[in-house]
Image (tube, rainbow, N blue to C red):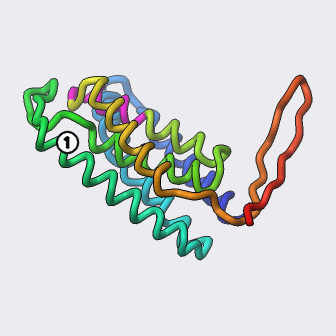
Amino acid sequence: MRAFKLLKLCFLLIAISVFPTSKTIASDNIETAGDIIQILIPGIAYGTTFYLDDREGRTQFYKSFGTNLAATYVLKYAINSERPNGGDHSFPSGHTSAAFQGAAFIHKRYGISYGVTAYLGAAFVGYSRVEADKHYVGDVIAGAAIGIISSFYFTEPYKGVNITPTHSNGTYGIKVSKNF
């Protein structure tokens, strides 16, 4: 469980880092934060497999990461659409696909309660790409879909103990489960 506390702390630090300090530099900060977070999310996902000595998860991460990367770049070069800023290879967003691949891996492998913050960070990455005129909304949505699909296809739930908060009909509880 200590690993999951560390995971939550990492995402808290990511969330704090995205708040700009001045309105005049907000746009640059948003783009820079998005650039950093798109690396941090899959990095944290991958690092967690080492921290938990989760060799099976590491193999699943390799497969989903490689598939995501290949699919994203094959589409980028096959479609070669123009970016809002005039550049090329707009579709799909590679930053967004990387961020959502990591977030979906965390969700599927370690549970939605850990994936929520990662998904929020990944959504911010998508927003940062549109805000910086690097991508259209459709590019970001496609990148997110590729990232999520690649992780969900290759990733199985962790065979440790999962503890998840629950709420149903005004009743709160904790669900404890273990996969065998």
Residue at coordinates 88% horizontally, 23% vertically from top-left? 169
* Residue where numbered disc 1 is placed: 75
Amino acid at dot 1:
Leu
Relative placement, left or right, of 179 versus 99 is: right
What type of secondary structure mainly makes up the magenta span? helix
Look at the image and say whether residue 125 sits in the magenta stretch. yes
Identify the element where label 1 is drawn. Answer: helix
> Can you give x and y, in whole percent of width and height, for residue 166 in the image?
81, 38
Relative placement, left or right, of 101 versus 92 is: right
Residue located farthest toward the right when viewing the structure as drawn: 171
Quadrant of image for the N terminus: bottom right
Does 123 sit above or below residue 35? Answer: above
Q: Quadrant of residue 97?
A: top left
Relative placement, left or right, of 178 versus 43 is: right
Range of the magenta residues?
124-133
Does 107 sit above or below residue 125? Answer: below
